[in-house]
Image (cartoon, rainbow, N blue to C red):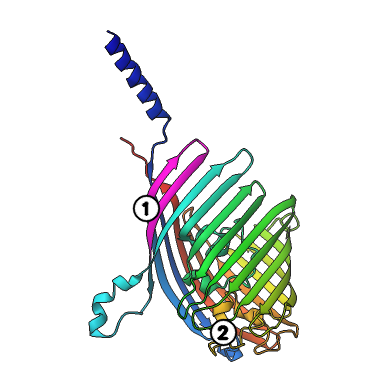
Amino acid sequence: MRRATLSLSLFAMAALISAAQPKPEFVFDLGFEYCFDNREFDAGGETFIESSTIHAARLTPAFGVALPVSANVTHRILAGIDIFKDMGASPTSEDLQSSVNTGLFREMTLWYGLDANLPNSTLKACAGIFPRRFSVFGSSDTPSADMPGRDIPTLFISDALRFYDSNIEGILITSSRPGSYYEVSLDWLGLFGSRRREQFIVQSYGKGSILPWLSAGWVASLHHYANSFEYSGVVDDVTVSPFLSFSLDRLFPCLDRTALTFHYIQGIHQDRRNSTGLEPAFGGQATLEIRKRNLGVKNEIYYGMGQMPYYDVSGPDGLPYGSALYRGNPFYRISKGLDWKAPGMYDRLEFYYQPVVAGFLNLRLAACLHFTRNGFEGWQQKLCLVVNLDNFRIRNRS
């Protein structure tokens, strides 16, 4: 009898302990992106950007395990693959035909994720190699009207780079609460090696409501571009941009969205190899966005000094730093060559059609025109389709 009672007690204790332990769940993350971007800059003599066409598709499946340790905290570990195809980029040599499919697998993804719903805020974190779309700096060209990051100038990351460099290798921490959002990330871009510079970039974004019609925030970036085995020479590129954003919806009730944002942009640059010292670059930007149903207009106009002073400067390898150093829109150079301190103007005018298709699917058709002090520089015709089943869970329904 005592043995039976003891056995029942041990069984009950084991059952209670088992019930208290979190049960792993199978989860997956699936992203798909199609981009057609015809870039025609012949009108301006291709001064800042060469004409080209981006026509590609990407699929990023990932699978893993989620461990909900409480009703408010979940840990995740996932691994996946980045499958990418530039349309028409197939091997032409017969001996390479066998690699036509394996070459589509560009990069492994693997990361740890944390989701914590705190009493007054939500905290999320990722560490490893994970999709850049988790960050506001990696949000696609088809963001929803109210999502954070719509007010980030393309100075901080260009459309092309956002699409081609689609993963962060490092850490991302975000925090949000009603009316505010904040994030900071570290992306390790290059490991010190042969013909490969050690480099990393730290980026931060924050925005919070002050009044129902007024928000304040910042965008910041620090890019450390260092040495390789063959060459020495460090460049520091720091850009900070506080901003004020005004909602004018009450003044124009006939429109669905009317927003006006003012950025002060402060760059601090240093080329240690050429002993430039700290060189500041000042500028300001105003952005107006108007939207009615599925149609919208967004105009960004910048005036100030060039924010990419060493774009045309030759590095220790004899090649210009160019886009290897500067990850933003090259029109923020303002002038080609070394005359970056002379202030100038850059205007980006975009007309777009963005219908509401589904909560997990975004579609955007846009025409983007570019102007500088020299006049019309060229334009883009863009079609973007994004499908995002982020952290969608499959539960065992048996």
Q: Is residue 183 magenta?
A: no
Q: Position of residue 157 (x, y in %)?
A: 58, 71
Q: Position of residue 339 (x, y in %)?
A: 71, 88
Q: What secondary structure is found at the residue carrying circle 1?
A: strand
Closest to the observer, 145 or 1: 1
Q: Residues within 10 Å of mark 2 (few under 14, many from 20)?
A: some
Number of numbered discs on residues? 2
* Image side of residue 47 versus residue 282, left or right: left
Q: Residue at x 47, y 37 (%)?
A: 69
Query: Which badge, 2 or 1, comes first in the chain's sequence?
Result: 2
Residue 360 visible? The answer is yes
Picture quarter with the C terminus: top left
Residue type for callout 1? Phe
Query: How far apart in space, not on screen, are marks 2 and 1 (Cα)?
Result: 38 Å
In the rendered structure, which segment of residues is drawn in magenta? 62-82
Q: Residue at x 67, y 49 (%)?
A: 179
Q: Are marks 2 and 1 in contact (CB under 8 Å)?
A: no
Closest to the observer, 118 or 187: 187
* Image side of residue 321 versus residue 74, left or right: right
Q: Is residue 68 magenta?
A: yes
Quarter of the figure with residue 98: bottom left
Q: Which residue is mark 2?
A: 49
Picture quarter with the N terminus: top left
Vertically, is 381 above or below 3?
below
Residue 261 visible? The answer is no
Quarter of the figure with residue 221: bottom right
Q: Which residue is mark 1?
A: 63
* Image side of residue 184 versus residue 16, left or right: right
